[in-house]
Amino acid sequence: ILNVEQSPQSLHVQEGDSTNFTCSFPSSNFYALHWYRWETAKSPEALFVMTLNGDEKKKGRISATLNTKEGYSYLYIKGSQPEDSATYLCASGMDSNYQLIWGAGTKLIIKP
Amino acid sequence: ETGVTQTPRHLVMGMTNKKSLKCEQHLGHNAMYWYKQSAKKPLELMFVYNFKEQTENNSVPSRFSPECPNSSHLFLHLHTLQPEDSALYLCASSQTRVITDTQYFGPGTRLTVL
């Protein structure tokens, strides 16, 4: 049974502080890892797709790293802003046509 | 309109009703998905269509019936639902069925079954 775990479940961060959270996934037969950002009452929005061990991706103040050998990815947010408040989802896939398995998300709340 | 749209955004139905959820994508994608999201749980994939053909059905009860008349439209027909079917139903599309393709999501339909 495949399981993707995200921690923590929720996180309160002061505006201006940096933060990070984790996505753990099965490392065997790994193929791809996706990160999405989901604001309340909106559609989930893609941030990154990562495939290679050691991969690092960056989009503005948000970046992600990938370790496929140990089965984890970190998402980092530098200098948190109120607009970063959202639930961050990760999803992992085992082969090119396998379905994505989703984590339950990390809910990030930025305190002004 | 652009992106992926879903209607209705909210739906309340009784257990004996029949209703349908609609999804439309304006991205020229070939794969479309139905997901169920219950409170505090991960997204659960229900159905996948690739080039209008159903490729996956994740043991979804027959009271949920998908329909994909063309690559741009996807429906989820609902009948004799149970209160535990109350959830957010999300539609998504991607260029192909390959797992590295980004999935683009609609805003979802919040379904309440009384």
Image: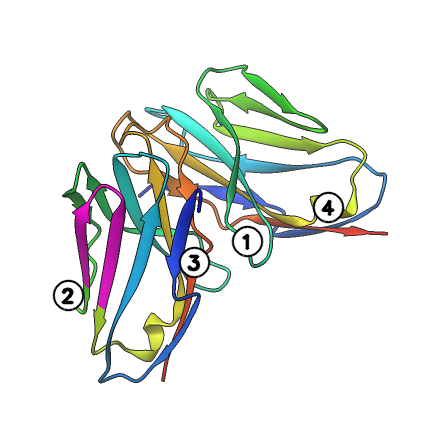
Residue A39 lies, with reference to residue B76, above or below; the image says above
Q: Do badges 2 and 1 share one subunit?
A: no
Residue B112 lies, with reference to residue B44, above or below; the image says below
Front residue of this view, candidates A12 and A15: A15
Instruction: Return the residue at label 3.
Output: B108
Instruction: Return the residue at label 1.
Output: A42
Residue ID at (27%, 33%): A98
Residue ID at (39%, 57%): B6
Instruction: Return the residue at label 4.
Output: A83
Q: Secondary structure at mark 3?
A: loop
B25 lies left or right of B97: right
Disc 1 vs disc 4: Cβ atoms closer than 8 Å? no
Read off the magenta span: B65-77
B35 lies left or right of A104: left
Give, as a three-letter code, the residue at label 4.
Glu
Q: Secondary structure at mark 2?
A: loop
Q: In whole angstroms, how far apart are the C-alphas of marks 2 and 3? A: 21 Å
Residue ID at (43%, 58%): B108
